[in-house]
Image (spheres, rainbow, N blue to C red):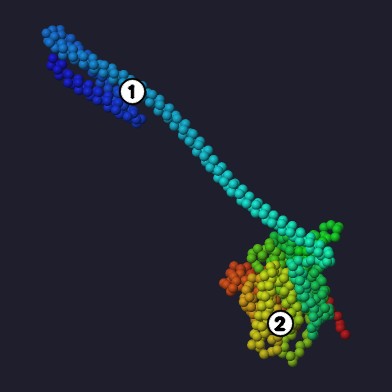
Amino acid sequence: MLFFSGFRPCYIIGVLLLFFSIGSLYAADIKSDAEAEQEQLIQTIIQDLERYKRKLKNIEKKAQEARKKSGTDFNDHKESIQSILNEINDQKNVISNIEKSIAAFKNKHQSYDKMMSEIKKMVDSLEDGVQEIRIRTSSLNKQKALIEANSIRLYEVLVDVRSRYERLFTELNKVKAQQASLEKSNESSVESGTAKIDILSLQHLLSAILVFFIPLAFSFRQKNNMLLADGVPEYQVPILIMAGLFLGYCLLGYGFMDSDTALGIIGKHNPFFMAINSLDIAILPPQLVENLLYKVGFTLLSAMIVFRIVGQKLSSIGHVALAFFIGAVLVPVFGHWVWHEQGWLATMGFMDEMGAVVANMMPVWFACAVLYRRRFIEVEPQQVDQTSTEMKAVYPASQVLLLGLAWIGFVLGTASGGELIFSALANVMLAGIAGSLSGFFHHAFFHTDASRVTRASGGFLSGLVAIAACAQTVTFPEALVIGAAAGVLHNIVTNRLRATILPEAWQATPAHLVAIHGICGIWGALAFALFGSAGGFGAPNIGQLMNQGLGIIVALGYGVLLGLLVGKWPFSSRKRPQTT
């Protein structure tokens, strides 16, 4: 009895602990990271149940033994034993229920494992799908960017096509209107018997006429006019020089200067002869003829400058051959470098608007090199009036005025706009006037001889030469400064050359021409960077100044080199004919 009375509290406490453990197990959440602990707890509960079963069996054995020993006590405690047995049966039922719950829990755990494995498989497949989606998304983004770029380009192309269509449509309307007006003008001209010339063609025609005043200016007979090496008077040669130069320019020079470039050095063909391509009568384009007549004026000026410097050192045949070379090679090749849009000096930034370097400075140094080569050839001594203090005029007033008209022709051929033409003409006139006055007053202030008017004529041409490089880009006050500086520079250089390098009487003409066309041509090219690139007396453009300096050095080297090469031509090797 004492055994049973002491065992009952322990058994009840154990059962309560069992229920508490089971309740705690069911109350806990099923988590993937606590699976091991749950399995261990289940194993512990099963072991406890087995231990309780063994204890119950021992209790039953002891109860049977107690019945045998004392039937009276057994009857007395029968009810308590029966109640204990009932409780044991109840506990067995509870244990069986717990075992069923544990089995159900195990089944749920196994299903949970299956679900987790399936979920894991689904996650893996989902990750694979996400990776594939990312790859496809990146390719789609690339395709989207490409489509957007192509769309932008297509839009730009469409806008360009539309603008070109509008311009073409506008030009077509203009052409139609011009055709209609031309038909009307043709009808009216046929009726009236007169032809209509547009303003631009008239401008080019006037330019070509004015530049041909250059040979006229050099053909005036002067007092004590010199004879060439073969006895031909000097004033009769300009017509021959013009013929030889025009032939050389038409045969070779025009193609070398204005045709398609070969590496920016020389023209590849002559469009003057390409127009004659059939047996029919060739009608040259008006623009080609206008350009030819205008550009030949620059070569005419260059040839006349060379003619006046070389003078008696060559015969008439030599001057004609030299003029042919000037028109065919000397000026056209260098002009291609400077005036062709793809010429190598033009692409580097060198500027010479109306030939200050191309037609004035470079031919002067070429003529000086030729003169140096032929310095040992004797010339006829000049008669000098010892009583007169006036220096012989290299350019008389009539020649100066004619050359001024030729400069107007250069402006008309170079400038295309109406306002630009008039401003350039004003700059040319202002520079010439300023050079004339500065040369006159400078000589009158520092000298007492009577050659101040001669210096005024030289100063006028010096101003024209200097402004030729920048007539379209400088302002009126800047043109005055450029011309005035050119007049003073002409006087200073002439005096120094006559005093040191060229003191002889026959060297007076080369000294003046070097000062007018050579030194003042250099000053005009530099003035373009000092004044023309900024406007209104702005700061000098250093980059443009370096480009101008490079062009001047190239012109100097080019002219001297060719002059040394052609200076040994044997055209004046004949003896001077005897005159009676």
Neighbor class of circle 1 (other Cα within 10 Å; few <14, some 14-19, many 20+) is: some
Q: Quadrant of residue 218?
A: bottom right
Which residue is painted at 70% across and 81% down in the image?
A: 458
Spot occupied by residue 109 in the image (x, y as percentages of width and height): 36, 24
- Residue at the left extreme of this rendering: 72
For residue 96, which numbered disc appears in the image?
A: none
Foreground: 319 or 295?
A: 295
Q: Secondary structure at mark 2?
A: helix
Neighbor class of circle 2 (other Cα within 10 Å; few <14, some 14-19, many 20+) is: many
Which residue is painted at 33% across and 23% down in the image?
A: 105
Q: Answer yes or no: do the residues labelled 2 and 1 have beta carbons within 8 Å?
A: no
Spot occupied by residue 526 in the image (x, y as percentages of width and height): 63, 73
Which residue is painted at 53% across and 38% down in the image?
A: 136
Foreground: 539 or 97?
A: 97
Tag 2 residue? 457
Q: Earlier in the sequence, mark 2 or mark 1?
A: 1
Instruction: Please give left or right for residue 303 compared with residue 52 in the image.
Output: right
Q: Secondary structure at mark 1?
A: helix
Q: Distance of mark 2 from mark 1, alpha carbons? A: 128 Å
Vertical position of residue 533 compared to residue 56: above or below: below
Foreground: 497 or 489?
A: 489
For residue 105, which numbered disc appears in the image?
A: 1
Instruction: Please give left or right for residue 341 compared with residue 111 in the image.
Output: right
Q: Amino acid at mark 2?
A: Ser
Vertical position of residue 490 compared to residue 553: above or below: below
- Residue at the right extreme of this rendering: 580
Q: Quadrant of residue 437?
A: bottom right
Spot occupied by residue 264 in the image (x, y as percentages of width and height): 69, 62
Q: Is residue 502 shown to the viewer in this render?
A: no
